Image (cartoon, rainbow, N blue to C red):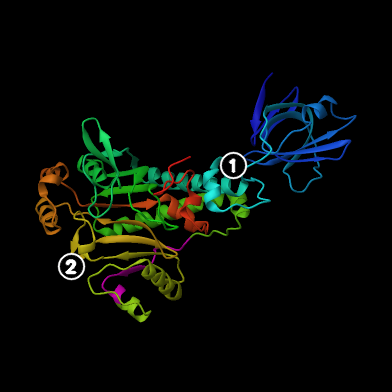
Amino acid sequence: MGGKWQKGVHMDKESGVKVHGWVSEIRDLGKVRFIVIRNWNEKVQLTLKRGVTPDNLFDITEGLTQESVIEATGRELKEKRAKSVDREILPRIIKIHSVSQSKLPLDPNWKVPALLPTRLDNRPLDLRRPEIQAIFKIEFSLINGMEDWLRNNGFMRVFTPAIIGAASESGAEVFKVQYFNRNAYLRQDPQLHRQLTILGGFERIYDLGVNWRAELSHTPRHLSEFRSMAVEMAFIENEQDTMRVEEELIKAGMRRVIEERKKELRILNIEMSLPETPFPELRFPQVYDILEEMGKEIRYGDDYDTESEKLLWEYIKQDYHANFFFVNRFPFKVKPFYVMKEGGMWARSVDLLYKGLELSSGGQREHRYDVLISQIIEKGLDPKSLEWFTKFFAYGAPPHGGFAIGIERLAMKLLDLNNIKEATLFPRDPEKILP
């Protein structure tokens, strides 16, 4: 007969409440047997009482193991006795879908904690933990909030190629792939194709997709495969326009998390509040002076390092009481050919940092064809190899700019995780490609 779904539990008018999940705990007291199951919404206790619930349920559940998958139908108790569960049910029917082996490579109940390598080797078991599921539910709401803001502000989602015929950025490693009878590459960033889409007359776009970098990096902030929210917009005045969009985008994502994920934030013991806007902005060359005052000397015209990012955060916290901040006008020599120059030496290139970690790069692009070609030559690149990209700038290009926010990095820092791999379902690094 007809039933309905409510809070992840099936309500059947004839049979009562139907629940399903993985067995988390079994306690046998003789005349009473408690079976706690977990699904991605809640924990439910099945209470089997001799003389109250059918006797065959004791036979069916005899020898049941942790992590077995079962389904139960019965009557929900209005007042549950167990404080550690969300609801309690007197079952009438129990169906066993799958019996787990008793020896587990990882304990989803976390009575025996595991190190991150073990967790990642046994990721499906690790993902059953409510704390881990909370991370990805928050990430889901974060992305939804950002996407909704973009749609509500006139941005259209597009899908740019993941396989490209030439490396999209100089200086970064790329993954080669065999593409029929020739070599191709996995994209490092949807940057250049976003720009070409702008040249196609699309004025406000975003691409939410996967990127790859073949860097031999073994740090808590690097992945070989990562996702980004990449935004591009036409007819901007300057890079400040991209910065105002980016900070509102961050706020919209965080606002959605606060509204939708109170339970998950509580599970992770995270207190989240919206940052004030506009975010503080630091600029080169003043950045050199700030770092020198903090005991870090960077040669004039050079880029800073990861230690400098943390020092700048300390400066921002002290002077602005903020965690998000922009760094603008980087030295042109350390930036790609497509950025717009400012004053000959600097670039309208903007990084967004949060708690001392770079989350995104962006800014204003160079849209003038002759200047673009001259910058390619200045970088020591072959204009012919980039003609597939640059030739369309000769047919009319508006002032434009954008940015790409690393989703996993943002989630990692918002949730105070120790490693970016914790914010990735199945992370890829130089060693790990399975499972």
Can residue 384 be seen here? yes
- Assess whether residue 259 is covered by the magenta stretch: no
- In the rendered view, would you say 430 is above or below 87? below
Front-most of residues 59 and 105: 105
**In the figure, is residue 105 to the left or right of 318?**
right
Can residue 155 be seen here? no
Say which quarter of the image contains residue 297: bottom left
Q: Which residue is mark 1?
A: 125
Q: x%, y% of residue 152?
A: 40, 44
Helix or strand or loop: what does disc 2 sit on?
Answer: loop
Q: x%, y% of residue 333?
A: 20, 63
Region of the chain picked out in magenta, as a range = 275-288
Residue at image location 54% in from the left, 43% down from the top: 123
Give the mark nearest the N terminus, 1 or 2. 1
- In the rendered view, would you say 96 is above or below 150? above
Residue at image location 69% in from the left, 31% down from the top: 70
- Which of discs 1 and 2 lies nearer the camera? The answer is 1
**In the figure, is residue 300 to the left or right of 279?**
left
Instruction: Give the total number of marks visible in the rendering.
Output: 2
Question: Of the numbered discs in the image, which one, if any, rests on residue 345?
Answer: 2
- Assess whether residue 279 is covered by the magenta stretch: yes
Q: Residues within 10 Å of mark 2 (few under 14, many from 20)?
A: few
Front-most of residues 310 and 274: 310
